[in-house]
Amino acid sequence: MYRAPRGTTDILPEEQTYWRYVEAKAVELCQLYGYRRLDTPVFEEAALFTRSIGEGTDIVTKEMYILKDRSGKALALRPEGTAPVCRAYIEHGMANLPQPVKLYYLAAIFRYERPQAGRYRQHYQFGCEAIGDADPALDAEVIQMPYQLLVSLGLSEVTVQLNSIGCKACRPDYIKALKHHYAPRLTDICPDCKIRLEKNPLRLLDCKQQECQHIADEAPRTTDYLCQGCQEHFEAVTRYLKSLSLPFNLNHRLVRGLDYYTRTVFEIQPLVGGAQSALGGGGRYDDLIEQLGASPAPAVGFAIGIDRVVLNLKKYKLPVPPIASPGVFIACLGEEAKTEAVKLAASLRAQRIGVIMASGNRSLKAQLRQADSLGSRYTIIIGEEEMKSGRLTLRNMLSGEQQSLTATELRAALEKSA
Ligand code: HAM
């Protein structure tokens, strides 16, 4: 028997209520904030991600799905959404549009991770990117958007973790101080941190190993090393968030798992579960567009994991509106009646009345049972008698009441009740 590949799941019809609801709320949010949808391919040149996410990151070294196409080109299933959006911004000359360009996506994302609850090899993200403007008000906006979305879904038991990791001007001094802090403690840190110290020192702060906790806690803080520009930017971001009454925690150990960030970084975490189960995150990436070969364009964005949002909606038993299914079922007996039923179903659908038609040659009782299990409000019955009289029977499935109607009367009755 074939099964869905490890770390992937089917989103069954009964689950779709959650997914469609979250997506509809996300689209509504983007309309409120003026973000326009962009869909990019599921795969890109692998180098796009290696360059942007960073060669030393877990995503690039351990988690990318790389495939060679028949010409030998290395492609990667997208392990995140920001780099493809930047690639498209450059490719389509969006720098010539009024800036910032505000884009959003709803996309499947692929990472070869160790699967567990809330961590999958294919997951879905809703993300927004505002490209072409360094205004700190945009940082506040992209923090407010996912927060507002989660609250509007009923998920307000979250914290916003915030930090600034500076820019290429001030970060080298910080990294020097960080290395200085770790140098005398080499024998106390985990093997991974020994590698991080050489390859990606900022990630030392993010270590989850017990033995590294107090060393990382006591490490110098990025915010103490910000240049004047970064400092003013960060002050403005926090000022705007306060003016929005958006609660946040300054977290000097928040650095994120992708290398493209500058200045603001943030994560939205559930009160229970913490960093391992972050619902969303993002930040500023002022150098990325330039790194990809175009003229510099500062940018900021976020993405939330829809799978984790859905898990939380279920966990807290939050209500989601049902997806409407056709309210009318047509039951028929005999071949002649079936021809009539096919015609009637088509004409009702043309009137925008949803109809499910009985299939096969089951008894009336079995057909009514099916109508019931589908949740139909009405069943139209076409049997021998109806064929003779030219009238149709309309059964109210809730009360069991039946009426004999002409086709015109039936249409009017269904329209009225729609
Ligand atoms: P990220 O933090 O790697 O950021 O992913 C965003 C969100 O996707 C996470 O907070 C989490 O909810 C969800 N997520 C990540 N990995 C998995 C997984 N394996 N299974 C289920 N859910 C997962 C980014 O990807 C950045 N591109 C965000 C961004 C946009 N930064 C600026 N703009």
Image (spheres, grey):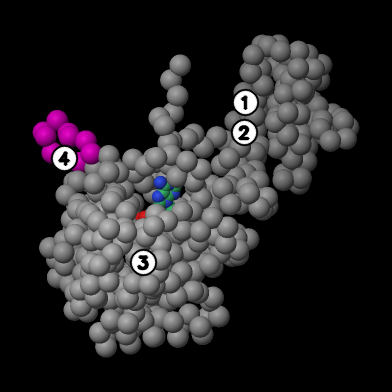
Range shown magenta: 66-75
- 2 or 4: mark nearer the eye: 4
Q: Residue at x 39, y 54 (%)?
A: 209
Location of mark 4 (residue) = 74
User: Ligand 1 within 8 A of label 3's CB?
Assistant: no
Classify 322 as above or below 84. Answer: above
Q: Is residue 241 left or right of residue 197?
A: right
**Circle 1: residue type:** Lys
- 4 or 3: mark nearer the eye: 3
Location of mark 2 (residue) = 347
Location of mark 3 (residue) = 215
x and y percent of residue 358 in the render? 67, 21
Badge 1 marks a residue whose secondary structure is helix
x and y percent of residue 160 in the render? 49, 69
Q: CA distance from mark 2 to mark 4?
A: 52 Å
Q: CA distance from mark 2 to mark 1?
A: 6 Å
**Circle 3: residue type:** Ile
Q: Residue at x 53, y 76 (%)?
A: 246
Q: Confirm whether residue 94 shows in the render.
A: no
First in sequence: mark 4 vs mark 1: 4
Please give the label number shown on residue 343.
Answer: 1
Tag 2–tag 4 contact (CB < 8 Å): no
User: Residue 114 or 86: which is nearer the viewer?
Assistant: 114
